[in-house]
């Protein structure tokens, strides 16, 4: 990824409370990204439809649809997450 593209994706990230994301979670559109991965890099790979990277991260349980348990924990903690939209997904990271 070139620096300009990375900067563009980085500028699209924002902190958001979990309560603001619940309706997207209900539609199955929120993807959790583990802290070991760079949210900007993952978002970029989603945006260019890099199926191999996404498949690898899924298989290694480094990304996944947000689970009910995560959603409940974040709701109870009134958690604020880093998020970026890569339609139709919203990628989040603690």
Image (tube, rainbow, N blue to C red):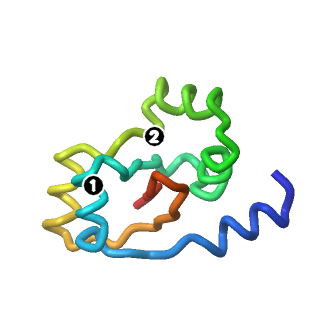
Q: Position of residue 75 (x, y in %)?
A: 17, 65
Numbered circle sitting on residue 81: none
Label 1, on which residue?
25
79 to 24, vertically: above or below: below
71 to 51, vertically: above or below: below
Marker count (numbered): 2
Q: Position of residue 87 (x, y in %)?
A: 51, 55
94 to 28, vertically: above or below: below
Image quadrant occupied by the C terminus? bottom left
Q: Are marks 2 and 1 in contact (CB under 8 Å)?
A: no
Say whether disc 2 or disc 1 marks the residue closer to the N-terminus: 1
Residue 90, quarter of the rendered image: bottom left
Rendered residue at 47%/55% (across/down): 91
For label 1, the crowd category at 10 Å Cα-Cα, with few meaning under 14, some 14 to 19 and many 20 or more, is: many
61 sits left or right of 5 in the view: left
Alpha carbon of mark 2 to alpha carbon of mark 1: how far?
A: 15 Å
Q: Position of residue 10 (x, y in %)?
A: 66, 69
- Disc nearest the viewer among 2 and 1: 1
Label 2, on which residue?
63
Rendered residue at 13%/66% (across/down): 76
72 sits left or right of 34 in the view: left
For label 2, the crowd category at 10 Å Cα-Cα, with few meaning under 14, some 14 to 19 and many 20 or more, is: many
SS at badge 1: helix
SS at badge 2: strand
85 to 64, vertically: above or below: below
Q: Position of residue 29 (x, y in %)?
A: 36, 50
Rendered residue at 60%/45% (across/down): 46
């Amino acid at each position: 990824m070139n620096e300009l593209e990375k900067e563009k994706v980085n500028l699209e990230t924002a902190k958001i409370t979990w309560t603001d994301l619940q309706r997207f979670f209900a539609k199955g559109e929120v993807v959790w990204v583990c802290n070991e991965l760079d949210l900007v890099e993952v978002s970029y790979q989603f945006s260019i439809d890099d199926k191999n990277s996404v498949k690898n991260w899924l298989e290694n349980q480094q990304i996944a649809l947000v689970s009910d348990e995560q959603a409940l924990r974040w709701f109870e903690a009134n958690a604020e997450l880093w998020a970026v939209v890569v339609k139709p997904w919203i990628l989040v990271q603690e």
